[in-house]
Amino acid sequence: MKKRSLIAIIVFFVWAGFCFPGLAAQPIRIGYLQGDLHQLACWTALEKGYFNDQGLDVRVGGIFKAGPEEMIAFAAGDLDVGYVGEAPATTAVANNKTAVRVLAQVNTEGSAIVVNRLLDANNLADMRGKTIAIPGHSTVQDFLLQKERTKYNLTETDLKTIVVKPPEMIGALRTGQIDGFIVWESFVSKAVTLKAGKILASSHDIWPDHPCCVLAAHRRFLEKCPEDAVKIVRAHVRATHFIGQHPEQAIDIGVKYSGMDRETVALAMKNITYTVVPSIDGEIEYVAFLNKIGYIRVPDAKAFVKDFIDTTILADVLTEEKTD
């Protein structure tokens, strides 16, 4: 084959997004949620240069106000990997809106129902006739609120829910536009430190140790750049270890990327467990509940989860650590 023809072919494949060892590849576009302290591992990997240490050119492709928005970006081809809630990722894949796979867990727990601190309410049943904001439909927080509402036999008439983006929730609570909200950290702790709200129920109270955010990758990226996917997981695992080993430095990173004050971030981190190992049983429970409320139609939850969560890369990375 002539040298000119070979170069033309290589240029085409690089333009198309294929990865070749030893050649400059397309930047890897990563997404995460605005102010979501659950995704501290993403911020840590960016801040500490862990992606660069793996030889990757990772660039922020989008910062989103809620998980469903991020899944739309995946569907539009604007992201290769992302830190996102497990529930919106599940819903998008189950409804054939986009094609991503979960490569690792990011955190468990870390959300709460917050209500106006002047309300005489001890549980969700006391919120009958009130309005609770959620970050979006099919979010983890929507799931948790639905679960808690079912516990107290509350109908949609009993408890009104509206969608409000997390950065706007505290303001809406203080001005009386809503009576409460359910959201991720650090917006929960910010409502507390501002003395605007009080925690009615933490996500630990609603569903102990529930899986929350995940590291997901588009299947197209996994097919074209399998070696880069391994490197992404390596950086994620390293960042998660850093959070546990250097909590004070992790708080500093959380302050920088969330825009919250140190008191709020330190308080919020106490409510979040950072982990990399996915909960298969937890995802099956997500699928079953999302089926029940009609958000998705999945005939075989176990088969769906087996295809949706790919733990092979993570297992290899963790094995590498043990042998080093």
Image: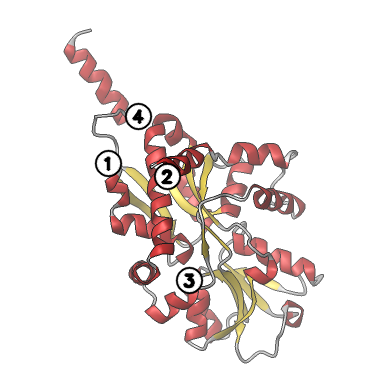
| Other residues around mark 3 within 10 Å, as few (<14) / some (14–19) / many (≥20) | many
Badge 3 vs badge 4, beta-carbon distance below 8 Å:
no
Give the mark toward the camera: 1 or 2: 2
Location of residue 289 by image quarter = bottom right
Q: Give me the residue at 47% from left, 62% from top.
A: 65
* Image coordinates for residue 70, horizontal then vertical, percent: 48, 53
**Residue type of the residue flagged with mark 4:** Phe
Q: What is the CA distance from the residue labelled 3 to the residue labelled 2?
A: 26 Å
**In the rendered image, which residue does mark 3 sit on?**
269
**Residue type of the residue flagged with mark 3:** Met
Residue 21 visible in rendering? yes
Give the mark toward the camera: 3 or 4: 3
Residue 321 is marked as 2
Q: What is the CA distance from the residue labelled 4 to the residue labelled 1?
A: 16 Å
Q: What is the CA distance from the residue labelled 2 to the residue labelled 4?
A: 28 Å
Q: Quadrant of the N terminus?
A: top left
The image shows residue 314, relative to residue 253, as above or below, that is above
| Other residues around mark 4 within 10 Å, as few (<14) / some (14–19) / many (≥20) | some
Of the two numbered discs 4 and 1 on the same chain, state the one appearing first in sequence. 4
| Other residues around mark 2 within 10 Å, as few (<14) / some (14–19) / many (≥20) | few
**In the rendered image, which residue does mark 4 sit on?**
18
Give the mark toward the camera: 3 or 2: 2
Judged left or right of residue 157, residue 268 is left
**In the rendered image, which residue does mark 1 sit on?**
55
